[in-house]
Image: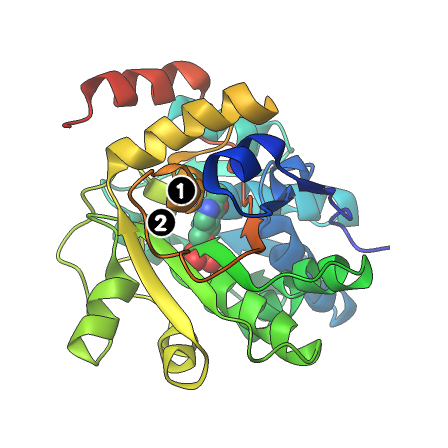
Amino acid sequence: MPLHIHTPLISSRPLTLRTGKEVWLKLDALQPVGSFKLRGIGAACEAHAAAGKTRFVSSSGGNAGIAVAYAGRRLGIPVTVVVPETATAHARRLIEQEGATLIVHGASWQEANERAQSLLDAHTAFLHPFDDPLLWAGHASLIDEVVREGLRFDAVVVAVGGGGLLSGVVEGLRRQGLADVPVIAVETHGADSLAQSMHAGRRVTLDAISSVATSLGAKQVCAQAFELTRSHDIRSHVVSDRAALAACLQFLQDHRLLVEPACGAALAALYEADSTVLASFQAPLVVVCGGATAPYEQINAWHANAPA
Ligand SMILES: *Cc1c(COP(=O)(O)O)cnc(C)c1O
C-alpha cells in the first residue's frame, strides 16, 4: 500500500457551465497531507527506507516538508525539517503535528537548507521538494489513476513551481501511451520561472519571488522540467496573484475545498473569462494540487489587498 491515496476524479458542473467544456478535476487536495506532494515524496521515502535509511531530512517549510513529516511518521522513521524564520506559524504547526523535529534556522531558505545539508550522513536521506526522479515517478501515479478510470481527456492543466509535478504528469502521460496530450503549465507572475525560461530558451533564475503563491516559488525550475518543454507539447500560461486568489475563493464556493493560491493558479486558467489558453480543448483534466499552508483568512486578506 502506498502512502498516498487514490483521489476522486469528478466532473465539475460549475466549471463545465462556465467554460462550455467538460472539465474534469483530479482532487489531490484530498490527500491526507492536503497536497499531491505525498505521491512523490511518499514513494521516495519508501525507497529510502527500503535502502536502509534511518532518518529523513527536509528543508521545506511548505507542503513538501509536511509530506516528508507525514511519510516518516507512517514509516516509523524520524524526520527533521529545517525551516527559515519566515516559515509561518501555521506551517510550523502542520509539520510538528506529524511528529517531526522542527529546526528554525536562518533568515532565508538558503540558510535553512545549508543547515539541513549539514545534518546529512550515510544513514540519512535528504528529500528534495521537486528535483528527484523518485518524486516524478511517484507523481506520475496521478495520471495512472485517471487513465485506469477510463477517462478520455485532451489536455492536462497543472501548476508549476520547481517542475516536479509537471515532470511527473508528463512521465505518467508517456507511460500510459498519451505522449501526444498537451500540458498547460500555469504559474503566477513573480513565480514564473518556467515561462521565463521557455521565453529565453534557457533555464532562467529569478532574482526574487514576488507572488503570494509561495508553493510555486522556485527561483529556477529543475533541468528535467525545462528539457521536457523541448520534447512534449507544454504550453506556458501565467496568471496574476489576484486571479489565482479569486479562483481559490470561487472554487471554495463551487466545490467546498480550500486550496492554496498555487493551486488557484491552475484553476484560474479555467475561471478567467478572457483566458484563451484552453480554447482548442474540449475535455481538460485539471490537477487540483491542493496545498495546506494558507488558511482561509490569509487567502481572503491577500485577495482583498491584491492589486487589480
Ligand atoms: C509543490 C506544489 C506545487 C508545485 O509543484 P512543483 O513540483 O514544485 O512544480 C504546486 N501546488 C502545490 C499546492 C504545491 O505544494
* Mark 2, residue position: 216
User: Looking at the picture, does residue 113 appear above or below residue 167?
Assistant: above
* Mark 1, residue position: 262
Beta carbon of the mark 2 residue lies under 8 A of ligand 1: yes
User: Looking at the picture, does residue 95 appear above or below residue 5?
Assistant: above
Side (left or right) of 173 relative to 86 = right
User: Looking at the picture, does residue 213 appear above or below residue 2?
Assistant: above
Decide: few, some or many residues near mark 1? Use Cα within 10 Å; few <14, some 14-19, many ≥20. Answer: many
Residue under the point 21% across and 81% down: 201
Residue 3's spot in the image, x, y percent? 76, 50
Q: Nearer the viewer, residue 276 or 186?
A: 276
Report the quarter where the N terminus lies: bottom right
User: Label 2 to label 1, Cα distance in Å?
Assistant: 6 Å
Residue under the point 27% across and 52% down: 238
Residue 81's spot in the image, x, y percent? 49, 44
Residue under the point 43% across and 29% down: 248
Beta carbon of the mark 1 residue lies under 8 A of ligand 1: yes
Label 1, secondary structure: give it.
helix
